[in-house]
Image (cartoon, grey):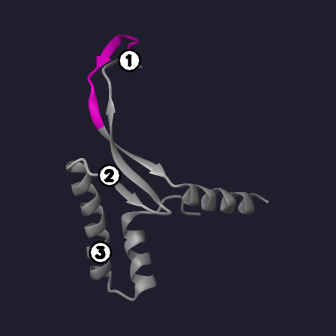
């Protein structure tokens, strides 16, 4: 059983479900990803109802530990992209997983 869905798999699924060619589907998938990245670069929040939202979150300066040496290190503050799953998305996946487990 395959446990990872790749970008190529997504492109194939889009092509199959829409009737687009693989090249057209690849262009559509790449355009979606590029649009998300471009919006986040300009600090715009992306909300896809029923799926989730992408946003930029500020992480403060903090103390951490190097796992290899145990030495304490300071981690600079930074901005990181985050994804928050929607309630509908989470519910659909968890219900499906419950049904598969029976």
Q: Is residue 39 above or below residue 13?
A: above
Q: Is residue 30 above or below residue 14?
A: above
Is residue 45 shown left or right of residue 9? left
**Residues packed near mark 1 inside 10 Å, few (<14), some (14 to 19) or many (20 plus):** few
- Residue 34 in the image: x percent, y percent? 24, 62
**Residues packed near mark 3 inside 10 Å, few (<14), some (14 to 19) or many (20 plus):** some
Q: Quadrant of residue 47?
A: bottom left
- Residue 89 in the image: x percent, y percent? 55, 59
Is residue 41 shown left or right of residue 54? left
Q: CA distance from mark 2 to mark 1?
A: 29 Å
Of residues 52 and 72, the one drawn nearer to the viewer in this rendering? 52
| Element type at mark 3 | helix
**Residues packed near mark 2 inside 10 Å, few (<14), some (14 to 19) or many (20 plus):** some
Number of marks in the image? Answer: 3
Q: Is residue 81 above or below residue 92?
A: above
The quadrant of the rendering that contains the C terminus is: bottom right
* Residue at 32% in and 78% down: 25
Looking at the image, tell me whether mark 3 or mark 2 is earlier in sequence order. Answer: 3
Name the residue tied to disc 3: 28
Looking at the image, tell me whether mark 2 or mark 1 is earlier in sequence order. Answer: 2
Looking at the image, tell me whether mark 3 or mark 1 is earlier in sequence order. Answer: 3
| Element type at mark 2 | loop
Q: Is residue 67 above or below residue 80?
A: above
Name the residue tied to disc 2: 45
Give the residues in magenta.
69-79
The quadrant of the rendering that contains the N terminus is: bottom right
Q: CA distance from mark 3 to mark 2?
A: 21 Å
| Element type at mark 1 | strand
Q: Quadrant of residue 6?
A: bottom left
Name the residue tied to disc 1: 64
* Residue at 41% in and 12% down: 70
Q: CA distance from mark 3 to mark 1?
A: 41 Å
């Amino acid at each position: 059983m395959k446990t990872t869905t790749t970008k190529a798999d997504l492109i194939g699924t889009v092509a199959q479900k829409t009737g687009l060619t693989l090249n057209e589907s690849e262009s559509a998938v790449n355009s979606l990803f590029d649009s998300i990245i471009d919006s986040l670069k300009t600090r715009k929040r992306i909300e896809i109802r029923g799926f989730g939202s992408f946003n930029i979150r500020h992480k403060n300066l903090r103390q951490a530990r190097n796992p290899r040496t145990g030495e304490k290190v300071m981690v600079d503050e930074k901005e990181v992209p985050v994804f928050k799953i929607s309630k509908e998305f989470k519910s659909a996946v968890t219900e499906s997983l419950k049904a598969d487990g029976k």
